[in-house]
Image (cartoon, grey):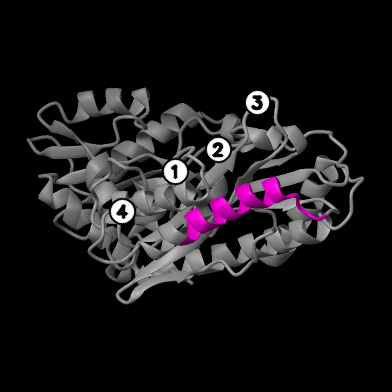
Amino acid sequence: MTRSTANNEELARARLALATAGADVALLSSLANVTYASGWEAPVPLGALADLSYGQPLLICAVKSPEAVLVAPDAYRAEAAAQAAVDEVIAFETFDSFRPTHSRQSYLDAVAEALRRVGATGGRGTLAVEERALPLVVERLLVQTLPGWRRIDAEEPLQRARMVKTEREIHLLREASALADVAHRCLGELCQEAGRTEFSMWAEIEARVFAAAGGAIPLTGELVTGPRTTTVAYPNGPLDRTTAPGDPALMDLSGRTQGYWFDCTNTHVIAATPTPEQRRYARASQAACESAMNALRPGALAADAAAAAEAAFAGFGLPMAHYAGHQIGVSVNELPRLVPYDQTPIEAGMVFSVEPGAYQGPGQSFGARSEKMVLVTPDGPEVLSTFVWGI
């Protein structure tokens, strides 16, 4: 459904944060922030079109007035115009089989025109850019066309804007979480029998997720079985390994749908009853996940959830192996993260993937990680994930 700039709440939040930072105009260039502020699912740069496009999508917007322009490759013109809640989409040339194109110059012309349309022309002002994602060719254009403008980094203001999710974002994250449920229920079915390869398991899980999503979506993460579950070496599979009865199987799967991510993990024992030690490690990671999720309440701190996970591990005589989780949205791994040193207050509207793990270590045979998605509400945590623990 097409949305207008007027009801683009994410862009409004971005503008408020950018205005507080002193910006007059913003030029956003990362996949996450272009998706967030425009409402268009900016494509992951993979495959032929990424090579045929000289530049990447950009969102250029005024901060104190309503103008917002999306710069996108011409191959995405129609879908960007249909999805993006902006004033205009300016498309630049990529490649044509029957006439020569000049993608670089077309890209620069599109950026220059977008800057003009949002009022960034000569004089003086403050331009917010993403320092770690700004193309050098665009920076050179800015030096030439806006010599009197100072630059500030847009990263911190956008992180602040994205911290608490809008109702639209929460709806999309619920839909993303439902796809993770599909994946992990499929994994549970596949772990009832040994003799499959990790490749074949991954293929079946991918097919189920694609069917539920209504088409192919980006998937990443790991599916590991046997001794590779004993350490964290993300990403680490799948590989051409055939499973045997009693093998552990751990899948940490992330996927992007409609611009928003899911990220969930579960651990199983394949075609066998878990041993007491396997059960101890699995129960420890599950208890740590549930304790950390329960700690995600308005007024608490991110560090409190990490402390809750650590205390749960201690009850099983195990240490905390890594962070307890992270927030999730247009990026798979967002701030705040659930670590002992993060003092960020928890607020209603945040959405986390909570993922503590326990691992026997190199030369051993078992490791477990347990991860579910949870929404912070005014009354406490709402666990979005509905799949059941594998052990």
Q: Nearer the viewer, mark 4 or mark 1?
A: 4
Q: In the displayed structure, would residue 138 be above or below residue 317? A: above
Query: Label 4: which residue?
Result: 304
Viewer-closest of 13 and 115: 13
Amino acid on which the number 4 mark rests in the picture: Asp
> Looking at this view, is 318 or 161 the one in front?
318
Image x and y of residue 356, in percent: 50, 47
Q: CA distance from mark 3 to mark 2?
A: 35 Å
Q: Which residue is mark 2?
A: 45
Count all numbered tags in the image, as a single digit. 4
| Magenta part of the chain | 273-290
Residue at the spot 77% in from the left edge and 37% down from the top edge: 226
Crowding at label 2, few (<14), some or many (≥20) Cα neighbours within 10 Å? Answer: few
Q: CA distance from mark 1 to mark 2?
A: 9 Å
The mark that comes first in sequence, 4 or 2, is: 2
Q: Nearer the viewer, residue 289 or 258?
A: 289
| Badge 3 density bin: few <14, some 14–19, many ≥20, Cα 10 Å | few
Q: Earlier in the sequence, mark 1 or mark 3?
A: 1
Q: Amino acid at mark 1?
A: Leu
